[in-house]
Image: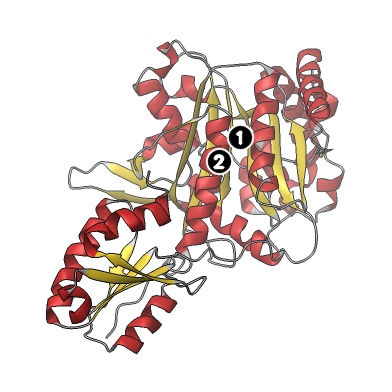
Amino acid sequence: MSIQIPRGTQDLLPGEIELWQYIEEKAKDICRRYNYQEIRTPIFEHTDLFQRGVGDTTDIVQREMYTFEDRGNRSLTLRPEGTAGVARSYVEKKMYGHANQPTKLYYNGPMFRYERPQSGRMRQFVQFGVEAIGSADPAIDAEVLALAMSMYGELGLTDVKLILNSLGDQESRTSHRQALIDHFKPSINEFCEDCQARLEKNPLRILDCKKDREHPLMASAPSILDYLNEESAEYFKKVRLILDKLGINYEVDPTLVRGLDYYYHTAFEIMADGEGFGAITTLCGGGRYTGLVEELGGPSTPGIGFAFSIERLIMALKAKGLVDSPVSKLDCFVVALGEEAKDKSAELLYQLRKAGISADKDYLDRKMKAQFKAADRLGATYTAILGEDELSNKKINVKNMVTGEQKEIDLDDFINYMSEQITGGK
């Protein structure tokens, strides 16, 4: 019986992975320009981190985490999201004491959630995320939003829209919370069990329910924007003002609720806007959080961040026909004929690779024609032909596969010649 890949996971093969690498490098370059540095945290953490950091009323904690006990009877969980791990590292490594603040970080790696697999929703998925921790300035909110929009814009994906909301500060949320309880309580028995359980614990999460989204009370629920105190309203106004000055378009949606408990003030999503994207239109989500660092044992520290799924981004790019998978090109393929030439080709390959040139050769004892076909399949820019005659004369024939030009080069000068052609001698 053959062993198959677990449901909700995928293999990324040569021919596909190049697109992933291209997107990840583009995202990293944008982060570099915004002065965000990479952080890598463990793939599994203590379960308590996510129960405290993400929130025990969230779908993630209640039903989606991959949790297990290790041999020391410690409860561990494969990370379902990236922010909690970054915040844990921020506290544990005392990054709040660093001279350069705010601490601006990005991460890229696999996350795990036990969900029903479907297009754009995997049980193991790759998430790219950004966190700016240590500043309560609305300008950093606008910076993070600009960074997120740049990710899509620079890949050519313009059919997206930025959706904004404010969840307010603690005072605003408390007022809104009571209004939501008063609104839903008389008819709460018409809602699902999850919503009934959340009524007193976290009624804001009712607005994020997928089962009851069509219930009439959802549309008439009190808006958080009507309960923002003066400070929260001014904060949200300043974020929008900066976005206006940056020329970044957005829509305010007072029903937008992020699925994690630690969000305050600015919350946002980037949505696919147009045909061809399929049922899942949320490409990116994030917001400002207050209390997360303190919950994990650190000082009172605000933060803001976002994360997006690489899988969903690729789906959106393909839906719009914007990106073909980049093809890995080989700089040089060495065609060797005869035993002595084959032995020499191994030496030449090693020298080419040391010089920074991607190179390969035939390992299946194929004829010359078949070797040239292999060079074509690999997209070789140059083919170097070494036979017994060339070897005895200390020569090698180099053919430019793009122009068709062919030159005979002294074997001793071959590496330098190729270096000049491929890297400009650098």
5 sits left or right of 174 in the view: left
Question: Badge 2 local density, few (<14 within 10 Å), some, or many (20+)?
Answer: some
- Residue at image mark 2: 57
Q: Amino acid at mark 1?
A: Lys
Determine the residue positioned at 83% across, 34% down: 223
Query: What x and y, as percent, mark residue 133?
Result: 53, 22
Q: Quadrant of residue 47?
A: top left
312 shown above or below 166: below
Query: What x and y, as percent, mark residue 28?
Result: 51, 40
Determine the residue positioned at 52% across, 71% down: 403
Q: Which mark is residue 201?
A: 1
Front-most of 425 and 131?
425
Number of on-image labels: 2
Determine the residue positioned at 85% across, 27% down: 226
114 shown above or below 373: above
Label 2 element class? loop
Question: Badge 1 local density, few (<14 within 10 Å), some, or many (20+)?
Answer: some
Query: What x and y, as percent, mark residue 399?
Result: 40, 72
Q: Amino acid at mark 2?
A: Thr
The answer to the question of whether label 2 and label 1 lie on touching residues, with beta carbons closer than 8 A, is: yes
Determine the residue positioned at 48% across, 52% down: 126
Q: Is residue 13 visible?
A: no
Label 1 element class? helix
Q: Is residue 299 visible?
A: yes
Spatial distance from mark 2 to mark 1, Cα to Cα? 8 Å
